[in-house]
Each structure stands twice: as structure tokens, then as C-alpha cells.
Amino acid sequence: MKNILIIDDEFEMLQSLGKILSHITDYKINLEQDPNEALRLIEEKQFDLIISDLKMGSISGLEILESAQKQNHELPVIMISGYGTIEASVEAIQKGAFDFIEKPFTSRKLLKSVEKALSRGIDISDDNLNNAQEIHGITYSSKQMQSIINSIEKISFQNMNVLILGESGVGKELVARAIHKLSKGKQHPFVPVNCGALPEELFESELFGHERGAFTGAVKTKPGLLEFANHGTFFFDEIGDMSLPMQIKILRLLEEKKIRRVGGNKEIDIDIRIIAATNKNLEREIDEGKFRGDLFYRLNTFQITVPPIRERKDDIVLLANHFLTDLCQKGGFLIKRFSQNAEEALKEYSWPGNVRELYNVVSRAFYSCAADKKVIENDDLLTFLSTGKQKLNQHIFLQSYKNAKESVISKFEVDYLTHHLKENAGNISLTAHKCGLDRRSIHRLISKYNIIYQDES
């Protein structure tokens, strides 16, 4: 039987909360109107869940939260308040609250939060860490990613801005999409834009739209991506690459919730959630004058840091097998698997390109193997991992000059093209421009080496 403590200095609300939960026989409900007595109970007794009002005279719900965490860091605390603001909810969540519910609320909403809070311990227990989980589009088994899932579920219902930090390729866009899927605006569009992929001269028009005749080639009025995302979520990927003039315009959007098309005079109301991501240290960028501090503080209402995959080794083989199974199913091949030695090689590699690089390595190993080969061995991965360079070089010396030269050139072409595809977020035109090649040459190389680029930022 789950032991729940409910704290509220208003008698009517306390009774109402108790009544909502009293219909569930598996819960033992403890009602406490005096927050001082509640602090004593938390120190003396064990509870599975605490539900507390935020404002209670001399003692706040945050003090209740602090006391509960001292007794048991994993003890979930649900905060309830009739003075709900984004600032209050962010503070409560950042200090460890499991959920923040604004009054008035429905019985269903409270019960759903209680159910999630009481089942959370099962999700992150050691017994379940070895089992693959796919929640909100994110496949994982590590404690680090479970912590991120918990954060996503806490903040999604609030219309607060979120800043996602992490190295290139860790899966920042997946986190952003998961937040959108759980948000109030989930029925409306999720619109991502890579701030470094669009040419500067086109960026403002793409985001804000333009009126007919605003510039040469503007033959008709065109709404921008921000209008398209109205009531939904807009994702600024790699916002650290945004120019200072555009940062000023985005700051105005965040402050006034209005936009104006290029060449237009009419202001358009915009109600969107902003999620931004970057692999840069924005505080250092601010010090160097490359990023506006006021924009940073607007975006950084809530921060999520996605760790590199080398720091969550439990996810490496899991994701590799996930990608491999997906490739087999899409290609109609026999289901392949990695040998034990191949799995060890995957775990030992440092993965500087993170999940994106892992996907490319699995894809290339998959397509380089014979169609009827069921097991991918260590040697099948060797040419695609930098840890295999020494053995690869030894192998080259045993080949004829012609074959060795072709091997080196092929590896160079694959690494060179993969690098530039990453840098340009898979944009063929930008990649061709940066490489000094035409689009046809880029497509030829992609086809030649079966390079599959999947943007996981």
C-alpha cells in the first residue's frame, strides 16, 4: 500500500485532495493542515509520495520539498499552487519537484500525476536498466537518459522556453520533439530550423515571411516558418550560429509575441513555444561578444544537457542494434546482429560524432556485409572506426600498390564527405559549395559508398 502525505493549510482544499485519492484503495492517505507538523512527519515516517501546496504562511512548499529530499532524494513531491507562474514552476522543478500543478485542476490531472510519480521508481530501478525502453521517440537504457525523460515529462505541460545543450549529434532534436509531443500545442506543428544552414540573406524572410514586392523575386506574399508554427513549437537548432542582428529580432519575438513580415507594416500575434539547442558554450560566446546575454536568459528558462554517448555506454550497443534492426526491416534483409567482439569494439570507441556517427557506422557496416551474412564481426566495423587505424594501416601494406591506394582514397572520400554532410546538416547544396564540387558529384559519392546521413541533432 502506497503511503501518501498531503499538506495544505486550507482545510477545504486539503479535504478535497484527500477525497480525490480516497477512492483508490491501494493508497494510504495522510492529511496534514499544519506545515510544521508535516515537517516532523517527514522526518519520522516513510512516505512514497508527498503532495504539498506551494504557499502556506510561514512555511513554503519549497521548504517541504527540501526536507523531503534530505530524507530521501528519490521521494517524489508534487507541488500545487493557485499562484501558478512559469517562474514558480521552474524553481520548483529545478529544486527537484516531480510535478507542478496549477489550481484549478481536474481530478484526472492530479491522479495522472500521482500515478506517474508512484511508478517512476520502477522505471529507473537497477533491475530495469538493462531493458531497452523507447519513450517519446527516444530509445535508451541509461540512467542519464532516464533523468532527461523525467525532465521532459515535468516541463512539457508548461509553456516555458527550453535550452538544450550538448555536443553535435547527441540527439538534441529528439529531445525537442519529445517535449513537443507532450505539450499543450502537440496538435500544432513542430518546426525545426538549423541556424547555421540557411544563408544569412534568406534567414529573416524564411522565419518571418515577406510581403509581395519586399525584395527582388518576392512576386507574392509568403508567410514565414514562425507563422506556420503558431500555437505549436519552434526549434532553433544550433542557435549559437545565429547572427547578432537576427538575435535582436528573435529577442523582440520573445518579449512581444509579435512578428512583422519583411516589407510589411502589420504586426502578427504569435503564440509559440521556443526550444533552442546548441553545441557551443553560450556563456563564453556572450563574453566574446558573439551572443546576446539578454537573449540567452530568455531562452534559458529551463535547461537540459544531453550527455555524449561515450558517457552513457549502456546506450551504445542498444542503439546500434536498434539501428541495425531498423535497416534490416526497411531493406527486407535477414535480421543481422553484432558479434560479442563487435559489441565490445562499439563500446570501446570514443564516438566523437555521437549518435549520428554511430548510425553512419552501423549503416556502412550493414551495407558492406553480404546480404545473407547474419553476424557483423569486428572486422566489418574496423575500417569505419578510428580505433582501427593501426590495424588498417598494417593491412594496407600487405596489398598491391593499386589496391592500397584505392583503399586509402576510398576512406578519405567517405570521411571527407561525411564530415561536410555533418557540418551542413545534410544540405547537399551547401555541402557541394563547401567542398568545391557540384551537386551531381556529391550524389555520386553518396551512392558509391552507400552513405546514409541522418540528422540526430
Image: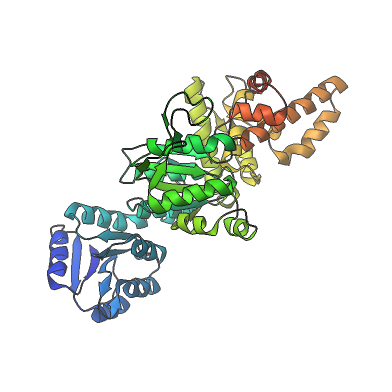
Q: What residue sits 52% from the left and 33% below the top? A: 323
Q: Is residue 141 left or right of residue 64?
A: right
Q: Is residue 140 left or right of residue 93?
A: right
| Residue 381 visible from this viewpoint | no
Residue 156 vs residue 407, the one in the foreground: 156
- Colour logic: rainbow
Q: What residue sits 37% from the left and 54% below the top? A: 155
Residue 279 vertical position relative to residue 332 in the rendered view, above or below: below
Residue 239, position as x, y percentages in the image = 54, 47
Q: What residue sits 36% from the left and 58% below the top? A: 121
Q: What residue sits 68% from the left and 34% below the top? A: 384
Residue 244, position as x, y percentages in the image = 58, 49
Residue 77, position as x, y percentages in the image = 31, 65
Residue 335, position as x, y percentages in the image = 50, 26
Question: Which image quadrant is residue 51 in?
Answer: bottom left
Residue 263 vs residue 409, the one in the foreground: 263
Residue 352 vertical position relative to residue 101 in the rendered view, above or below: above
Please tell me how many numbered marks the rendered image carries: 0
Name the image quarter holding the N terminus.
Answer: bottom left
| Residue 430 visible from this viewpoint | yes
